[in-house]
Structures are given as C-alpha cells and as structure tokens.
Image (cartoon, rainbow, N blue to C red):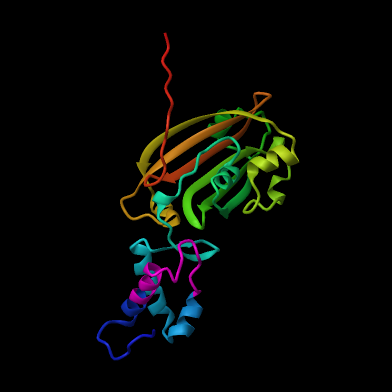
C-alpha cells in the first residue's frame, strides 16, 4: 500500500495512518524497531520532514517511542510489563521475569570533587572520588526507568573501562571486584516528571512518576552505591507486606 498524492489528506497523515494500521494489524510487532527515517523516505518517496511529522504524531499517540542512540520502536503496553525488584540488579530481575533487559548509556564520568551532599549520603572518606553513571533502562525495548548511579570509585577502580551500556553493574561489583552487597535502604515518593524525563520515558504532559532513592551497603558496612531512579507511574507498583506484632 502506498500514498495517494492526489488525495487532499497531507502525506504525513497518510503515512502516519499507514504505519498505525500496520501496528494494529500486527505487521509491526510491539518492541520491534521501525525502519529508519531514510528507509521510510526511500520506501514511500517522501521527504524527511514528512517522515518526522508522521513519527511525531505516532509518538504523541503512544504507538512508538524513540530510544537515544538505538532507534525508534513500536510501543509495548506498559500494563504487560511487571518486574520484581531485588538486590540481584535490574538485568537479573528482568531476565528472571522472562523478558529482555537493555540499556542506553546517557552519561558515565568520574567526579573528582563530590558535593557535600554526596559525601554525606555515601559516607565518603577524604579524597574519595565518585563515578556517575546515567542509563535509560528498557524492557523488551520499552523505556521504563531512568537510573542515575553514584559509585565509590575507591571500591571499584577502572569501572568506567567496562561496557556499562551492556554489563550489569551489580554483576561487575560482585564478579570483578569481589564485593558483597549486603543490604539496601530505599525511599520512594511521587512527583511530576521533568521535560527531559518525559522525553526519555516517552511520557505525555503532565506525567506522574515515582522516584526512588536507594543506598546500597556492603557486608563491611561501607556504602558502595547511591542510586536515583525515575519510574513511569503507569506501570510501577510499590508492594509492602505488613506483619502483625504483639
């Protein structure tokens, strides 16, 4: 099926409707990548402006989403995605649920002079440096969380030399550095997403998100990680178990 250039309907709307139909009919499966902008231009003999406008409308309707550095994908209903969180780490948690985890690395750098807040929260010693890693976390190619992690560089030197977009940080800490993650303290609260967070998580304004702040301790009592996470409020659930006491 092509585009009707004699129709009064703009080409971008025709292209948008065609792609939406392919998604609805299952020709484009949830979680699969769309053709690139250039491929769509060549396939339908239209300009890149036309393609981008069609994709923009599909994204606005929640049918597709774009992952920085990876491409554009058919959206998966967030209601179909449930991940039980543990100290095993995001990658292991997602795989345990039978789904495919992936990450887009947004930032990875060494902070030579941590802020006083970081020093206090991570119980840093004088001279300690901190590694900052920011990643967009995906499940079946769907962006579900934005994670920013601060690591005590003294406890995991050279960690920036690893492929942090592909490797599990918790696995690295255990296997590469022989560290034992003993426990974590976490607090969760609801807020509105920032413009950047809405763009990365493919959310529409106004978007409610849950923020989680977690401090992870080693068996020695030292803080190895301070993690800040932003979760889409549509799919993230906080479950607590309460036990009666005498």
Q: Is residue 195 left or right of residue 97?
A: left
Farthest bottom residue in view: 6
Residue drawn at 33 percent across, 82 percent down: 11
- Residue that protrudes farthest toward the left in the picture: 8
Residue 154 drawn at (x, y percent):
71, 36
Along the line of sight, the residue nearer the viewer: 204 or 112: 204
Pinpoint residue 6: horizontal percent, then vertical percent: 29, 91
What percent of the width, then of the height, locates residue 22? 40, 72
> Is the N terminus in the top left, top right, bottom left or bottom right quadrant?
bottom left
* In magenta segment, residue 45: no
Residue 170, compared with residue 48, is above or below; it is above
Residue 63 figure quarter: bottom left
The picture quadrant where one finds residue 153 is top right
197 sits left or right of 174 in the view:
left
Residue at the image position 41 percent from the left and 74 percent from the top: 52
Residue 132 is drawn in which quadrant? top right
Image coordinates for residue 10, horizontal then vertical, percent: 29, 82
Q: Is residue 240 left or right of residue 93?
A: left
Q: Is residue 85 above or below residue 121?
A: below
Q: Does the magenta stretch mainly form a helix, a strand or a loop? A: loop
The residue at 36%/72% (across/down) is 21
Q: Which residues are magenta?
A: 17-36
The reply to whether the magenta stretch includes residue 20 is yes
- Judged left or right of residue 65, residue 207 is left
Quarter that holds the C terminus: top left
Tell me if I can see residue 142 in this picture: yes
Judging depth in this view, the residue of 171 and 155 nearest the camera is 171
Q: Residue furthest top?
A: 246
């Amino acid at each position: 099926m092509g585009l009707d250039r004699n129709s009064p309907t703009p080409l971008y709307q025709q292209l948008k409707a065609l792609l939406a139909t392919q998604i609805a009919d299952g020709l484009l499966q949830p979680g699969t990548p769309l053709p690139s902008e250039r491929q769509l231009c060549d396939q339908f003999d239209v300009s890149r402006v036309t393609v981008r406008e069609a994709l923009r409308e599909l994204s606005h309707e929640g049918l597709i989403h774009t992952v920085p550095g990876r491409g554009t994908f058919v959206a998966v209903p967030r209601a179909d995605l449930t991940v039980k969180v543990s100290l095993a780490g995001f990658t292991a948690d997602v795989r345990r649920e039978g789904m495919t985890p992936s990450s887009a690395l947004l930032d990875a750098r060494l902070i030579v002079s941590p802020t006083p807040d970081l020093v206090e929260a991570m119980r840093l010693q004088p001279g300690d440096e901190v590694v900052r890693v920011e990643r967009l976390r995906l499940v079946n190619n769907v962006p579900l969380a934005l994670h920013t992690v601060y690591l005590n560089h003294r406890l995991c030197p050279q960690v920036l030399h690893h492929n942090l977009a592909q490797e599990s940080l918790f696995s690295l800490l255990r296997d590469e550095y022989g560290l034992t993650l003993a426990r974590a303290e976490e607090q969760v609260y609801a807020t509105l997403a920032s413009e950047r967070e809405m763009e990365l998580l493919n959310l529409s304004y106004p978007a409610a998100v849950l923020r989680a702040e977690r401090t992870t301790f080693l068996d020695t009592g030292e803080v190895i990680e301070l993690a800040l996470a932003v979760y889409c409020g549509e799919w993230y659930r906080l479950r607590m178990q309460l036990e009666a006491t005498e």
